[in-house]
Amino acid sequence: MMEKKEVPVSTDKDLWVSWDQYHRCVERLAHMVYESGWKFDQVLCLARGGLRPGDMFSRIFDVPLAILSTSSYREEEGTVQGELDIARYITMTRGSLAGRLLLVDDLVDSGVTLERVQHHLKDNFPAVTEVRSAVIWCKGCSSVKPDYYLEYLETNPWIHQPFEEYDGLRPHQLAAWMKKGEHK
């Protein structure tokens, strides 16, 4: 049996999110999109941060999931932003991107990724007729605003998401890692 990990108190500089909070946020964001009345044909999630929300949206709305890998946070266990990379190909099980597309990510920070991906889609996928974006968190420093966002974070805190604890974990550390969560 695993213990529930205690989440530190959030401040203007740090937003701490538990697994339960994270899942509720994705559900609330999905409900917001549903309530808007906008219908979409596919979900395109930005990996890695958008993988979990994208998967949940695909299941809830019963639409195909496509994945586009992007990366800008690499240094210092993912805390220092570097040059943005956008994968050449989009992964999906059948067909190609077409119609109305919901672009899903966990957050918009500077806005660079969201803006560059939208241009990438417009330039390379002419069958896509409309793109809207949905994120859990929108930081005040962002140069763009997504169409749907759950929380606006004016003070631009670092968001400590529950899966970040795996960023520094390596395979040889797994046995000790798993033991620390067990009841004695």
Image (cartoon, grey):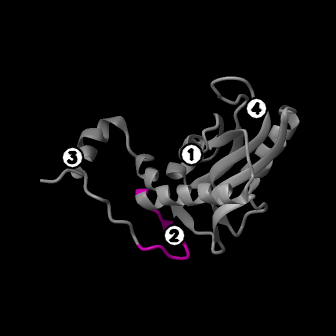
**What segment is highlighted magenta in the picture?**
9-19
Residue position marked by numbered label 2 in the rendering: 14
Q: Are marks 4 and 1 in contact (CB under 8 Å)?
A: no
Q: Are marks 1 and 2 in contact (CB under 8 Å)?
A: no
Q: Which mark is residue 60?
A: 1
Question: Foreground residue, 56 or 120?
Answer: 56
In 3D space, how far apart are the residues under numbered discs 3 and 2 (Cα atoms)?
A: 28 Å
Q: Nearer the viewer, mark 3 or mark 4?
A: 4
Residue position marked by numbered label 4 in the rendering: 97
Mark sitting earlier along the chain (1/2): 2
Mark sitting earlier along the chain (1/3): 1
Categorize mark 2 by other alpha carbons within 10 Å: few (<14), some (14-19), many (20+): some
Mark sitting earlier along the chain (4/2): 2
Q: Nearer the viewer, mark 4 or mark 1?
A: 1
Task: Inspect the image, locate mark 3, and give the three-letter code of the amino acid beneath it.
Answer: Lys
Residue position marked by numbered label 3 in the rendering: 179
Task: Inspect the image, locate mark 2, and give the three-letter code of the amino acid beneath it.
Answer: Asp
Q: Residue at x 66, y 55 (%)?
A: 34
Q: Is residue 6 left or right of residue 19?
A: left
